[in-house]
Structures are given as C-alpha cells and as structure tokens.
Amino acid sequence: MVKCLSAAALLAFAAGCSENSSIAADENEVRVRFGGFVGEKFDALIKERCQSADAMGKFYEETLNAFRTHYDDTICSDHGFWQNEYWGKNTLGLIAGARYAGDEKLIEKIIAKSRAFVKEFQREDGAITTYKDVKFVVPKDPERAWMCWNLWGRKYTLWALLEVYSVSGDKFFLDAASKLIDQQMSMLKELSLKLRDTGCFSGLPSLSVLKPVLILYKETGNGKYLDYAHEIVAEMDDPHASNPPPNLVRNAFCDAPVSGRYPICPCDTRRHTKAYEMLSCFEGLVEYSKITHDFRALRSAVLTAEKLFKDEINVMCAVGYADRFASAARRVNAVTEYCDVIHWVRLCRFLYEETGDEKHLDRLEKAFYNAALAGFERDGKWTTHFVRSHGYGHFKAPKQVGMQYHQCCVDNAPRLATTVSEIAVRSLSSGIIEVNLYSDLTASFKGGELALSGNYPVANEVTLRLASDSPRVLRLRVPMWCRQMKVDSKVVQGPYVVLPAASKGEWKISFDMPVEVFSRNSPELSKPLNRAECPDAEALFTASNHSPKKISPVRKSFAAYLMKGPLLLAKTAHLGDTEDEIFNFSTVNGLDAKASVEPIAPEGGVWGAWKLILTIPSGKRIETKVSDYASAADDGGYTAFSVWF
C-alpha cells in the first residue's frame, strides 16, 4: 500500500515512533556506495586520486614541497600565489575518498602523514602557510590585486586539520587548528585589518573561512570562535552607505542580479563575482544560520540562490560563466568552471538540509547528473577546468602555479562523492529512511540495507529493496521535474511519498520521462551583453581551448536544448554523429518542435544512447543519435559534441 503523508503528519508520526523506538542514535549513520555508471566514475576517481601509490606518494609530497620552497611569495616579490591551498584541499579530498570507500587503512595513513605535516610546518606562533612572509595578506600591486592567496590557503589547511580530527579523535589536530586560527585573528588585529581587507576580490576568498571557523567552534565550544564568526558575518552585512564589497548578506536583499551588484573593474572583470569563492561564503552563511538560528543569514543564501537560478543557470544545469557570475543564462557558448559546479551542488545540498525545500534537491540532481559527472574523466586521473555546452571536448584542467600533480578543480573532485552520497539516502529520526536520488546504489545502516537498481536516470524504472532488522519507514522524493511518479503502478504525489514501516520489501518505482524541447528565445536571453562584464565567448573559446588544432565553433545565436527527465541530451561523435550534425545544423529553436527517443546500444563508452526524432509543425523530421551529456565528451580527448539542436 502506498500512503502519502504531509510534512506535519510525518513529524507527528516520527514523534510517536520515538516514544517506543529502540533505535540508537548511531543508526542515523548511512553509508552509500553508488553502482552503475556513477559508481564506476567515483571508484575510478577515488582509486587514482586517493588510494593509489602516487596519491599518497608523489602527489602528497608535492603539497608538502610548497611549504618548503615558499614558492607562493618568493617567485615574485609582489605576487602571492596559491600553492598554499593544496595540502588542505588535497587532504580534504583524501578523507572524502576514504570515507566514501570505507578505506580504514587510508584513514590511518592520512592521520600519520597529517601529524608529521603539523610537526614540520606549524610555526612557533601557530601559523601554517607556504608564504615566507606570514603577514603578506594584502595585495602589494594594485594592478595585480588578485595575486594574494595567503589566507585562502590557510582556510583549507584549517578545514583539513578539523577533518583529520573528526576521523582520528586526536586533540593534537584540534589544538593545531586552534593555534592556526588564533594566529590569524591576532595578526589581523595587530595589522588593524578586517578580513574583507585581505586577499583578492575584495576579501571574498578570505571570508570563506567562516565555515571551518564554525566547525572549530562546534568542536571546542570556545566562544571566541563564535565571536569571530559574528565578526565575519557582520563584514558581509555592512549597512554603511558605501556598501563595501562584497557585502554578500546585505546585497542579497537588493533587486539587482548578482552580476550587477558591483562596479566593473578594468583590470579584473572577476573581482567581486568570482563564483567559486562566493558560493563558498554562502555555504558558510548556511552553517552560521544552522548554529546561531540567524534567519537573515540563511535568507541571504536562499535569495542569492534564487537570483543565481534565474540569471546564472547555464544549459549544463550549473551556475556561472568561466568562474564568475556574468549573466550566464544569456550565453549560448556556455562554459563553467568545475569548482563552481561542485560548490553549486554543495550549496544546494546544505540549503535543502536547512530549509527542507525540495527545489534545492531538484537543482542538485540536475547539476550532478550533467555538469558534475561530465567534469571528471572516465579513468579518474584528472578533471576538466571548464565544462561547456559544445566543442571538441571540455577544457582540460591546466597545471597551475608550478604544480605538476594538482589543480584546484582536480583536488576538489573527490569531495563530490561524499557531498552527493550523504544526501542520496539518509536516515532521519525514529528510523525513517529518506531516498532523494535513485541511482544504482547500496545504502548500509545499522541493522539493515537499502538497494536501488535500474540504471536511473537513463532508464525510467527502478527497483528498491529493503532488508532491515527492525521496521523502517521509507520517505521517497518525488522529483519536481517528474510529471508522474508511480510506486507499484500507483500514482503518488510529491514532494515526498511515505511507505508504511516494513522490515523487508521490494517496490517498483517508475518516472514519466518524456523528452522535452526547450527554446532559448526570450527577449532577455537575446539582449546584448556588456563586453565590460566579461570576456566574450569567442575569445575564451579560441584562447583557452586545450587543442590549438581543434578550435571549437562559436555560436552566434541561440538554439534549442533537450532534457529527458533530469538528463541533458547531447549529440556526440562517440555515437557516430557527424560534425555537420553536431555543429552545422538548422536549429529548431522556437519552432514548437516535438521530440521522441528510442533506446539504442551505447557506443564509445557513453552511458545512455538513443535515436532521436524531432518533428516540427511544418512536417519536417530530423533524426540523429544522442547520449546523455555527462558521457558525451568525458573521455579527456577532443570528442566533438553539442547540446544545441
């Protein structure tokens, strides 16, 4: 029997269960491992970047070398680079990969190596930095104001130390983290600097330390860290008429789009709207609201997410254009940095957890199955720098700031596994199991296991199996994009359907997934862009392409795109589509085209493959082959592909 309960009824049900429940608190821990295409990609990534001999060998050693050479501020006297970030970011990725894989031996190695790291590199005053000049926290050259990353890198070191503490329980790491941030706080006070006065982009990267500061407060209970968090948020909510950037909280309540809130800077068009760093700050604001119950901080994150969804959502279902917010929804030559994709997924997750609003899960799902899965290569060895709408492959992540084995997007990628697995299936109070994503997976919890199979969302039907020592209530998400979801052939209503408590069971879940044609022809989308906002697409596509012999075509006008459920569809050379079919076609944009698909055998390593039939009212019929966007060009080569029709 399928039964739908309201949110209020569900809470009442949970309260009633709790009176007689024998379920222990640790039963809220769920370990999810993906199978199928998603699982293969995550397994390859974690094997190569976390578990391999190189990962714990030469990759790791390179992050230590940054602290020995002081490359960041000795290679140029007035520049401050960002090798500083890699030990912390890499360690966060290693722990995420170990947690996802359940690799206890890897955890032990990380703890031992982290202990040696602290002993070698924590200075007497508590600082841990690659910068020889510890106080180099303000740009020295106004014309190169984006070259100062000292505190940004320390943020990642702080966060990593806290994660090592969480897996070890060893106060050695908590003390090291406290000393690190204590030094930063006292140093800025000595220099009479606000955090927003430091680093680049008007302090945007520096302000992102908010979340690890809050984690430190939760772990220590020391009120001075909460006070510091209050100071950081106040710097983002300055009521002064000058509206000092980035002022993220204050500006969230204005009508202007995110891209229009700050003056254009001639020397650096990304100054105040750097997407990766801004998303990181809003993640901190969500955490701040969770701890302090500050509704204004949470509201600022919600309002900004709404603005981004309206103005910055690109066709790949992520946000931004080339790592800045620059009216991405109005760009047909779409390109977005992989770090931005990962952090949009993270923000959507934490907004859902804090608000309970399902739209954040809908956005997470589409970003994950499209831009996120497209962003790391099939063999797991590397990632893209930018995923894009069309061209000859995605933009491969370049080696940065003298590093051979690290790049910001590459090091961030393993954290995607835990970000998504921890929201895919989770255990709520009183034994309620919530299912949010329907990929092939196994979710293990104390006393039981839940499994999903069916190759969702390439296929539209999944089988859910439950085996538990005690009765469990299942709470199943009904996706917002789904016109009709059925459980055991019965239509259910969203946003969630609740199944009666059971110890064992099997259910068939089906999703209505017709292919929909979306046209990009509104007056707003066709409005010319101010060139001062951002470099034009043609310059980016020709200058940044990773193959000078394969200059990707630049579209001069919008076309249509296709969605099958949460999947963006693409033409790809992997299926034998010709370059004329992929790039040189008469668009169906605005022609009221209808689409249908028939499954075909996948080729070239694509996940899903279909024969597409497009018809327009004039009677014209177009046939081609399409795949899911994520696998259309994730082989790291120069595969021709396009999402435009």
Image: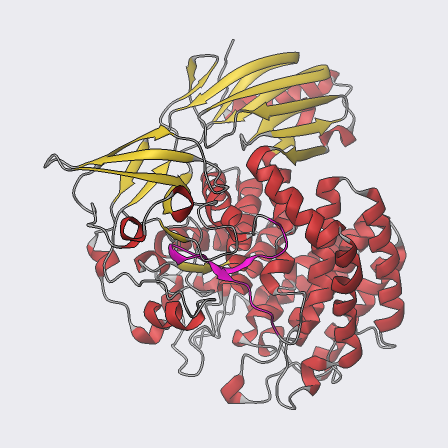
Q: Is residue 273 above or below residue 33?
A: below
The structure's colour scheme is: secondary structure
Q: Is residue 29 above or below residue 61?
A: above
Q: Which residues are magenta?
A: 379-400
Q: How many numbered tags mark residues here?
A: 0
User: Does 208 sit left or right of 327 as displayed?
Assistant: right
Q: Residue at x 18, y 46 (%)?
A: 590
Q: Magenta span has 353?
A: no
Foreground pick, 113 / 482 = 113
Q: Is residue 129 visible?
A: no
Foreground pick, 542 / 320 = 542
Q: Position of residue 94 (x, y in %)?
A: 73, 53
Q: Position of residue 271 (x, y in %)?
A: 47, 74
Q: Residue at x 60, y 72 (%)?
A: 400
Foreground pick, 103 / 450 = 103
Q: Position of residue 312 (x, y in %)?
A: 38, 57
The residue lying furthest to the left in this view is 618
User: Does 212 sit left or right of 632 as displayed?
Assistant: right
Q: Is residue 529 above or below residue 516?
A: below
Q: Magenta span has 380?
A: yes
Q: Residue at x 38, y 23 (%)?
A: 484
Q: Position of residue 638 (x, y in %)?
A: 45, 58
The image quarter in which residue 129 lies: bottom right
Q: Is residue 126 visible?
A: yes
